[in-house]
Amino acid sequence: QVQLVESGGGLVQAGGSLRLSCIASGSISGSIFSRVDMGWYRQAPGNERELVAEITSGGSTNYADAVKGRFTISRDNAKNTVYLQMNNLEPEDTAVYYCRARRITVNYWGQGTQVTVSS
């Protein structure tokens, strides 16, 4: 059993900041978590789910072009947690943000947290 719980979403004005957190529990937590690739995705109404940022078990990161320079993904393996620091938010960042864990070939998803950026 794997559970991913996101938090930190909310309503913010353009130019503001939010920090999302995703805590993993179950079979990918503990000593396993450091070997799990983690990522953040988002889905706006009418759009497909898209990658925002990802961080590998080795700490390598990858960002969507739209968020480069504004968002930072990080992880704390001791806390089974991955973070997404979002700065200089834009109305176009409004979406439900999902946490994804990938262990070998299996993907696990959280329930999502809403981020709304007002202009």
Image: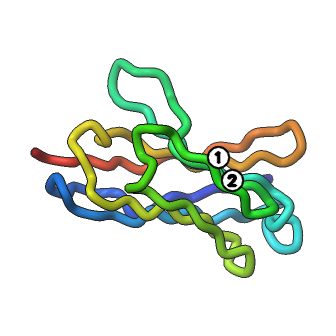
**Residue at coordinates 35% horizontally, 57% vertically from top-left?**
9
Give the residue at mark 2.
38
Query: Is residue 89 placed above or below 34 in the rendered structure?
Result: above
**Residue at coordinates 22% horizontally, 62% vertically from top-left?**
16
- Whether residue 109 is visible: yes
Q: Kindly state the secondary structure of the residue where label 2 is placed.
A: strand
Most extreme residue toward the bottom is 78
State the image quarter where residue 24 is shown. Answer: bottom right
Q: Earlier in the sequence, mark 2 or mark 1?
A: 2
Query: Is residue 74 placed above or below 115 in the rendered structure?
Result: below
**Residue at coordinates 75% horizontally, 39% vertically from top-left?**
107
Q: Which amino acid does label 2 sit on?
A: Met
Tag 2–tag 1 contact (CB < 8 Å): yes
The residue mark sitting in front, 2 or 1, is 2
Q: Distance between the residues labelled 2 and 1?
A: 6 Å
**Residue at coordinates 63% horizontally, 56% vertically from top-left?**
4
Q: Tell whether 66 sits left or right of 105.
A: left
Q: State the image coordinates of residue 48 (x, y, percent, origin top left).
A: 47, 22
Q: What residue type is labelled 1?
A: Arg
Categorize mark 2 by other alpha carbons within 10 Å: few (<14), some (14-19), many (20+): many
Q: State the image coordinates of residue 11 (x, y, percent, origin top left).
A: 21, 55
Q: How is the image coloured?
A: rainbow
Q: Tell whether 114 sits left or right of 97.
A: left
Give the residue at mark 1.
100
In the rendered image, which quarter contains the C terminus? top left
